[in-house]
Each structure stands twice: as C-alpha cells, then as structure tokens.
Image (cartoon, rainbow, N blue to C red):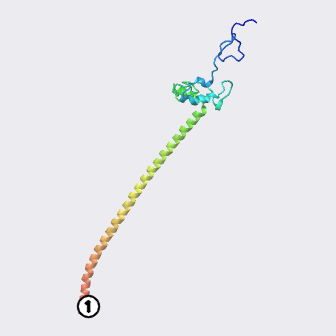
Amino acid sequence: GGRKMGRKASTGPPPPDAAGPDEPPRRKEIRPEDTIPDLPENQEAREFLKNAPSKGLWLPFGKEVKVMKCWRCKQYGHRTGDRECPMKQTGNVSNEKKRRVLYDPMASLMERRAKKKEARREARRERQLKKIELYQKLLEEERAKRDQRRNERMLAKAAKKSKKKKKRKKASSSSSSSDSSDSSSDSSD
C-alpha cells in the first residue's frame, strides 16, 4: 500500500460553526428572545418572545411581535415616540385633536357626550342648590313668623292675665267692702 497523507476523513456531521470549502460561514441562528438582554426585569418579555413565531402572520396571544423597547416607558412592542406609548409627548394640541378625530371618531364623540353630560349634571346641581337656598330662606321666614305670632300670643295672654288680676283686685276689694257691709247687716238681725 500506498501511504495516505493528511487527515482521516470524518464520517459525522461537521460542527455547527464549521463551514465547508464552498459554503459561506454560517451564522448562529438568532432567536427572537436573544435580542433582549437576559436580565431579571426582562424575563417576562423573553418568555413572551421565546415561543413566538418569527415568520408569517402569526400573532401569539393576539399581540404583534415587535422586538423593540421604548426608552421612555421601558415597555416592549413600540419605539420611543410611537402613538401607543403612554408617555408620548403630544406636540401641537390642535393637530393632536384633529388626528384623534380622524383616527378615532367615536372617542371624540364620546368625549363631547361626556362634556355635555357633565355640564347637565353641573346645571342640575346648581338648580338644586338654588332650590335648597330658597327653601331654607322660606323656612327661616316661616320660623320667624311663627315665633313672632307665638310672642304676640304670649304678650296678649300676659296682658289678659294682668287685666284679669286688676279686675280681681278691684272685684275683691269692692266685694270685701260689700261683704263687710253684708255681714254687719246679718249680725243686726
């Protein structure tokens, strides 16, 4: 025999990062959860993305898979400045209102209804307060009139009593003088 030079040919599959002579070097497969750092606060996002499909029209848990993190609110699924960010800074208020009406006309309608309802509630509250004030005023006037009538009656009663006392005094003084004359006439018989 002839002597073989070089290495012995391998019968098993090549290592995953080893490339053949005519193949370009292979990259390690990037999984969706690998795009998020493996930190304890990111665990929920990593678990969500672990089983999420990376291709097709799949929406796991009914959520769109977006591997991005907002700098402002620190939530995954949108970038800083996106409309769904709760901390999005609104620019021109009138443009923002127009945009909201354009994208969500029911929201503006419900907002107007809520404002009208609140205005009606406030007007009703004002009317009730005015009624209460009026009734309290009438009640105070009625109490004052009742107290005045009671005082007048008490004064009239007191005046009658004093007149009766005067009459009694007059009657008792005149009757005592007539009684004494009657008793003297009785004793003479």
Horizontally, residue 84 falls left or right of residue 177, namely: right
The residue shown at (63%, 23%) is 31
Q: Residue furthest top?
A: 2
In x, y percent, where is residue 178?
Answer: 26, 83
In x, y percent, where is residue 116?
Answer: 54, 39
Tell me the amino acid under the disc marked 1.
Asp
Between 47 and 143, the one nearer to me in the picture: 47
Q: Residue furthest bottom?
A: 189
The residue shown at (29%, 73%) is 165
> In the rendered image, which quarter is residue 117 located in?
top right
Q: Residue furthest right?
A: 1
The residue shown at (24%, 91%) is 187
Q: Which residue is mark 1?
A: 186
Residue 50 appearing in the image: yes
The residue shown at (35%, 63%) is 152
Mark 1 surroundings: few (<14), some (14-19) or many (≥20) residues within 10 A: few
Please, is residue 188 above or below residue 30 in the view? below
Between 30 and 181, the one nearer to me in the picture: 30
Figure quadrant of the N terminus: top right
> In what element is the residue under mark 1?
helix
Please, is residue 155 above or below residue 110 in the view? below
In x, y percent, where is residue 28?
Answer: 63, 19
Horizontally, residue 131 falls left or right of residue 76, namely: left
Between 153 and 122, the one nearer to me in the picture: 122
Residue 64 appearing in the image: no
In x, y percent, where is residue 110?
Answer: 58, 36
Please, is residue 112 above or below residue 154 in the view? above
Figure quadrant of the C terminus: bottom left
Q: Residue furthest front?
A: 1
